[in-house]
Image (cartoon, rainbow, N blue to C red):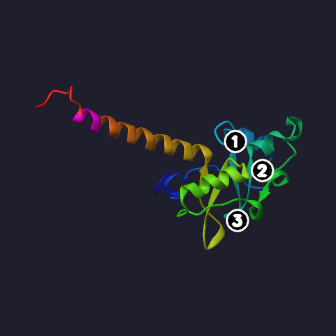
């Protein structure tokens, strides 16, 4: 993780939802299996977030009348990060808060959503970086291998 910042792993393309959306509509319009955390926006500003665990706590029979606003975690209670924060800080915030996503906000305007970091985006980035390092080591190893024929 050395040298990585939140900006290196943050998503720029992610679903956002509105407070008035019913949970059954949210389920129909999004792939709940593909995302565990949804920023909630109101008038273009971050107003909170809803996660899959909050949705699943509501019985399926009540999701047609339950709105996102009924299960939202309001912005004041959200754990957020900034683009230039070290990635390790985000990992520590994930661990402390036990959330699936961290909104990336503008440091001068904590309601201005600029991206999203998920546990999955961190994991995928670290995995890709590890594979690239391993491939580099393998390539270097081949170049210096005593069994490799010299040209």
Q: Which mark is residue 21?
A: 2
User: From mark 2 to mark 1, how far is it between C-alphas?
Assistant: 10 Å
Q: Residue furthest bottom?
A: 108
- Dot 2 or dot 1: first in sequence order is 2
> Residue 137: x and y, percent?
33, 38
- Dot 1 or dot 3: first in sequence order is 1
Q: In the rendered view, would you say 151 is above or below 136?
A: above
Tag 2 secondary structure: loop
Residues shaded magenta: 140-144
> Looking at the figure, which quarter contains the C terminus?
top left
- Dot 2 or dot 3: first in sequence order is 2
**76 and 19: which one is in front?**
76
> Does 66 lie within the magenta span?
no
Check contact, mark 2 vs mark 1: CB within 8 A: yes
Which image quarter: residue 73? Answer: bottom right
Can residue 85 be seen here?
yes
> Residue 148: x and y, percent?
20, 27
User: From mark 1 to mark 3, how far is it between C-alphas?
Assistant: 20 Å
The residue depicted at 32 percent of the width and 34 percent of the height is 138
The residue depicted at 60 percent of the width and 58 percent of the height is 89
- Dot 1 corresponds to which residue? 29
Q: Residue furthest left?
A: 151
The residue depicted at 68 percent of the width and 50 percent of the height is 95
User: From mark 2 to mark 3, how far is it between C-alphas?
Assistant: 14 Å
- Dot 3 corresponds to which residue? 43
> Residue 118: x and y, percent?
61, 48
Q: How many marks?
A: 3
């Amino acid at each position: 993780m050395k040298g990585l910042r939140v900006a290196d792993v943050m998503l720029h393309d992610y679903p956002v939802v509105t407070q008035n959306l019913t949970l059954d509509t949210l389920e129909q319009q999004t792939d709940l299996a593909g995302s565990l955390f949804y920023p909630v926006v109101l008038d273009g500003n971050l107003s909170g977030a809803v996660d899959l665990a909050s949705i699943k706590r509501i019985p399926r029979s009540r999701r047609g009348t339950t709105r996102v606003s009924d299960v939202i975690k309001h912005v004041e209670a959200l754990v957020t990060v900034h683009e230039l924060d070290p990635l390790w800080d985000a990992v520590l915030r994930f661990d402390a808060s036990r959330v699936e996503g961290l909104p990336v906000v503008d440091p001068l305007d904590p309601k201005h959503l600029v991206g999203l970091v998920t546990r999955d985006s961190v994991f995928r980035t670290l995995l890709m970086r590890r594979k690239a390092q391993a491939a580099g080591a393998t390539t270097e190893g081949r170049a210096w291998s005593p069994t490799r024929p010299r040209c």
